[in-house]
Image: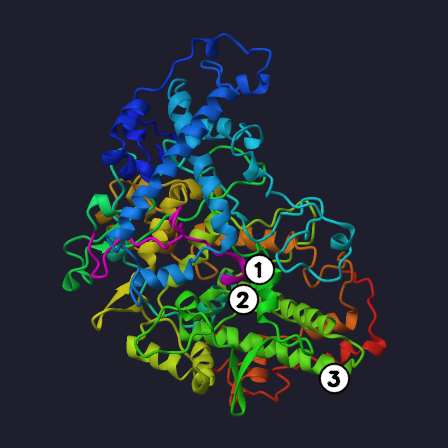
Amino acid sequence: MIASTMHYSKEEEFPSTMLKYYLIGLYSVTLVFICHGWNEHPDNTRGCKRYEDPELCSIFPMKKINWKEINKTIIFVQNIYIRMETREKILGYADIKIETGTPSHGLFVDSNPEPETTEMMKVSLEAVAASSQIAYEYCTSELLRREECGEKLRRIKLWKTALRSGCQRLGKICMKEDVYSKYRSIDGSCNNYMKGERGQSFTIYGRLLFPEYMGGVRDPRRSVTRQVLPSAREVSAKLELNSIPDQMRSWAVLFWGQFLEHDMAHTAMSKMIHTGKPIECCDPDGRAFSPRYEHPFCMTIKVPPNDPYYSERDVTCLSYVRSAPALGPDCSMGPMEQINQATHLIDASQIYGVTKAKSDHLRNFTKGLLSVTHLTNSTILEISKNPQSDCQQRKFNAPCYQSGDKRVNTDPHMTAMYTLWVREHNRIAAYLADMNSGWDDETVFQEARRIVIAEIQHITYNEWIPSILGTRIKTEYRPDIDPTVSNEFATAAIRALNSVPIGKLSLADEEKKHTYLHKSIDLLLSEMYKNKFTGRRLYYIGKPREVTYGVDILSVDIQRGRDHGLPTYNDYRLYCGLSEAETFDDLRPIMLPKAIESLKKSYKSVDDLDLIVGGLAEKPERGMFGPTLTCVLKDQFERTRGSDRYFYSNPDQPSPFSHSQLKEIEKVTLARIICDNSEKIEKIPPKVFEIVSKRNPEQSCDSKHIPRLDLQAWNNERYTYNHVTS
């Protein structure tokens, strides 16, 4: 039986993880009050009154609900969150905080919630808490399955409740200038001018399947045996994947995937509600706090005592803070959803930012240029003026850079990729400004940005996707296609690239590369296309007292999938039209024996498998992954292209590229971008996503095998837009 069809008793459903530690101990009287239900109102079952909404009354026929009860519940949970200020002050008095240089600090920098997120978080938490209470009170009495309960809750809109102020910030009305704008918006809005919020930054992730939470609203799912799922670290440590080196693909496949992820998805972790401070869930030595010092938003990853890596370092706790929730565009109750801080489209938002304020901060406002740091005969990214916020402070005091996304500092190779594209923007902008003297700074900036986005889109769909999926995607634009990034894509499928075999870099090597980044951009870029995958990857992060331990990214990704309510691997097999595994032995046709054995050691049932784990364990097919992750990736990239009104090849955008401009864009390869923006690289394989071989030998950057984009096609004197036909 699939886990999503299981039922749980009241005792198992309540209390929810987000509030349990706060309620237990501090508000035991309140807890008893909730568990026994509050005032039973006999008139709830007597049909709708004149002042009540008939549709609302029909949601729970056996025990009718009214707006008075909904608002009463909302006010109740609001009071609980108000009282949480005391709890957060206690943590402050106890000096429970994230210390600079710890793994928690690194994770916080990568998932730091922006002000727009924290503004949405409080009302979203209150809506989720109220939904959880209503689900407990009404769904249990009607014996509803979780999906049925969640769907009914989503019919309850918050516009008529005490949370209506949060609804007023949702949605986007597009003006005439938005509809006919030649350039896409910075925040992704009005790409679809009928539903302006589609694709916009700071909106929720979509879903391929209805979320699966224990209790139907927010608590992580359990095993089909009703027990807690195995520790994410236990699963990760035992997982055996194919260790045979990939003889075809280079590291560039991985790093481009990460670069693309930064463009399309950025999940934020929660902050403290009242103090606005980051949340620490484990002490700096990797030990768990006592329950009184654990914030309700913590969902720590337990490390088994016999862990092959952490036990030697006496680490028993890996910090994980639950992701920031957000309201959907319909402003309804229901299961918890998570916010995407990035735009949902491929639009180079990691380079240009996702708000106008951020974009303006990155600009030079001279000849359309982005701000950079100038060195002798070289340029690197602008040095951050806020390293505590933008970077994890490293052992060697490496410089901290700024770009459109704080994950620019994730590792040196990613920093090099960002540097490459900032240089490309400035290279194009300088050429356009010289060629078209009548263009002002804004025109040059927008035209250069437009070309850069087109180049990234072309490389993604013409080079990278065929390498990773084994097939091309050529979806035509349709305004009814929804671009919203799926939770499954952001939380599992694209994240799986972080756990494919790639090899391991030492802490010292990583730090030296960050320290001398301005001297080693060429080295980092060349590593991407010269190296093949060889083994599991761990990120090594500094720690106080000169001790280090690694953050197992796969453990974090598994935990995030559970936090986000992703259903099971088997559920996605069925969604993708694949066979369901009833036993572990049914996995033999699609997984290697050692992978199946490792899964048996962790999970009690094949129906418990996490999506990212089952997906990684599958044998690759035509592309880099097995059929399940390929299905999720393919779905997203088809929708991303088909929904983008401003996709570079779409003739239906307000001002499409001319025939001659399209021909130039279609020449672009990642090899050409590296040739044009590195300092000393003179030879490179034409196919950067493949390793160097006889069929893909290094060629001179001046070779016809690595064609140049001729920017003369953008000469203002012959600048025309012709309708492009397919």
All told, the count of numbered labels is 3
How far apart are the alpha carbons under marks 1 and 3?
Answer: 28 Å
Q: Residue at x 19, y 59 (%)?
A: 315
Q: Position of residue 668 (x, y in %)?
A: 63, 75
Q: Could you tell me if the residues under marks 1 and 2 are in contact, i.e. CB atoms within 8 Å? A: yes
- Inspect the image, locate mark 2, and give the three-letter code of the amino acid beneath it: Gly
Residue ID for mark 2: 404
On-image quarter of the C terminus: bottom right
Give x and y (percent) for residue 308: 18, 61
Label 3 – label 2 distance at C-alpha: 26 Å
* Camera-side residue of 636 and 318: 318
Q: Residue at x 85, y 78 (%)?
A: 717
Would residue 499 be seen by someone viewing this image from the given angle? Answer: no
**Residue visible at 55% across and 30% down in the picture:** 157
**From mark 1 to mark 2, how far is it between C-alphas?**
7 Å
Residue, disc 3: 434
Q: Is residue 656 above or below residue 394?
A: above
**Is residue 164 at least partly visible in the picture?**
yes
Q: Quadrant of residue 700?
A: bottom right
Amino acid at dot 3: Asp
Q: Which residue is mark 1?
A: 354
Q: Position of residue 518 (x, y in %)?
A: 46, 84
Q: Which residues are magenta?
A: 262-288
Q: Earlier in the sequence, mark 1 or mark 3?
A: 1
Give the mark nearest the N terminus, 3 or 2: 2
Tell me the SS state at disc 2: loop
